[in-house]
Structures are given as structure tokens and as C-alpha cells.
Image (cartoon, grey):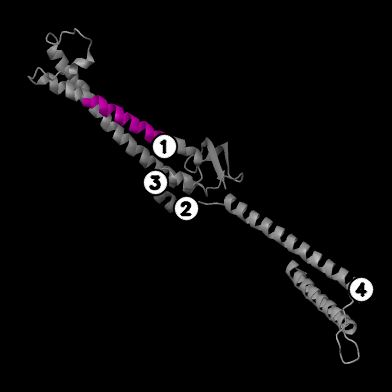
Amino acid sequence: MSPIQATYKLRAAAVTLLLLLVAHLSAQVTSDTFVDEGNIPAKINFENIQFDTLSVDTLQNAIQTQSGLSADSSRVSKKRSGIEVSDRIRNFKPEPYKATWLAVVIPGAGQIYNRKYWKLPIVYGGFMGCLYAYNWNNQMYSDYRQAFLDIMDADPNTKSYETFFPSGYDYQRNEQYLKDLFKKRKDRYRRWRDLSIFACVGVYLVSIVDAYVDAHLSSFDISEDINLSIHPEMINSSASTNNYYGVNCNISF
């Protein structure tokens, strides 16, 4: 008998006992509260009302049993739901299509969907490193570009390049050298700034590919049934009477 059927039967028994008890009490109250002469109501004597101890005890036992079954069924349902949730978590298989689109829309979301949280510091660390390199190289490029423009013009008031050297430095004597130096530094930091942008795009693409491949490999069989055996073997040749020696590789799934 299932717990649900037992619960229904106990409820029916409890209702039956309750009705019997009410009928019994009603009969006693009616007989004690009315006199025979003219149906004149008399004073109710509660001391004369006798309760059926057996019926009350049976009803209490039925209610307690029903409460116990309800608690047991509640615990069983909670335990069953907990087992189902743990099974879903353990048997989770990510979808490559969904993981890819999440990684495209939000960098790192594909790794979160695949539940590879340890990859998040790598992904966001790569982005932060590329952004820092871009900002630093862009600042250096702007400084050397302005210094190159100032040293190339004929305006004596534009001397931003003086901040690169100590006071008292002879700019007139090394003017041509400084022009070449500022031009090389300007071009170098501009190239490094552009490479920082490409590196940031590369980290973004790698995070997408990683989410896609990781979702595919989540269903890859890595059980102990897969093994590789390598052993030497003698090969017989039909075209020659000589025997050849080689290596035989067997992969079993």
C-alpha cells in the first residue's frame, strides 16, 4: 500500500470516528437537557456527559498516524527532489551552440555556462592586460608624437620635448638626433598600441573557441574502457619470402 492510499484511508476512518463521537455527545446532551413535562429546557449538567475514551483515543491515534505519514511523505518528496537536482547537476551536458553564443555576447559567459569557473581569471586577466598595454602605449605614443611635432616646427614656445631630458641639456647640438629618436619612439609605441588591440581581439576569439570546444568535449568518453596497447609484431609479406618487423598499435573503446 502506498503512503497516499494509507493517508486517504486514515482520513476516512478519522472522519467516521468524529461523526460517531458527535452523534454520541448529541444524544447524551439531548437526554440530559430536556425534561419530559412539556419539553421545558433544563440546566445542562456537563458532569453527566460521558466521553467514549476508546473513540477519543482511536481518533487521536489516527490523527497522529496521519501526521506522521504526512511528515514522512514530505521528507521522502524533499529527499527525492534533492536527489533529482543533484542528478541534474552531475549529469549536466552543455550545448556547444548555446555556449558559443553566450561567449560571443558576453566574454566569459561561455565558461560560466560550461561550469569551468577557474578559466574566468584567465579570460578577464587577458582582457585587463591587453587594455592596460593599450592605455600605456597610447599615452607614450601621444607624448612622443607631441614632442616630435614640437621639435619639428619653428615655434620656440612649443618645447614639450624638454620634459624627457634633464635641465641644461643642449637641444640645439643634438637636434637632428632628437628628431630621429622621437620619430622612432612615436612609431614604436603606435605599433605596440595597435598590437594591444589585436591581442585583445585574440583573447576574445580564444574565449569563444574555448567555450565551444569545452562544451563539445564535455560528452567525450574518458572512462577506463578506453585503452591503448603497443607491442612488436612480425609482418609476413606475400611479395617476398622475408619477414618484416614492426609495431602494432591497438585502441579499444
Above or below — where is 81 with respect to 42?
Answer: above
Magenta-drawn segment: 124-142
Q: Which residue is mark 1?
A: 124
Q: Are marks 3 and 4 in contact (CB under 8 Å)?
A: no
Relative height, residue 190 to residue 231 (above, below): above
Classify mark 2: helix, strand or loop.
loop
Could you tell me how far apart the alpha carbons at marks 3 and 4 are, in whole angstroms? 80 Å
Give the foreground label among 2 and 3. 3
Q: Are marks 2 and 3 in contact (CB under 8 Å)?
A: no
**Percent x, y for residue 155?**
8, 20
Q: Main secondary structure of the magenta part?
A: helix
Q: Amino acid at mark 1?
A: Tyr
**Distance between the alpha carbons at the discs numbered 1 and 3:** 11 Å
Instruction: Find numbered disc 1 in the image and state the secondary structure of the residue it sits on.
Output: helix
Tag 3 or tag 1, which sits nearer the N-term?
3
Is 125 magenta? The answer is: yes
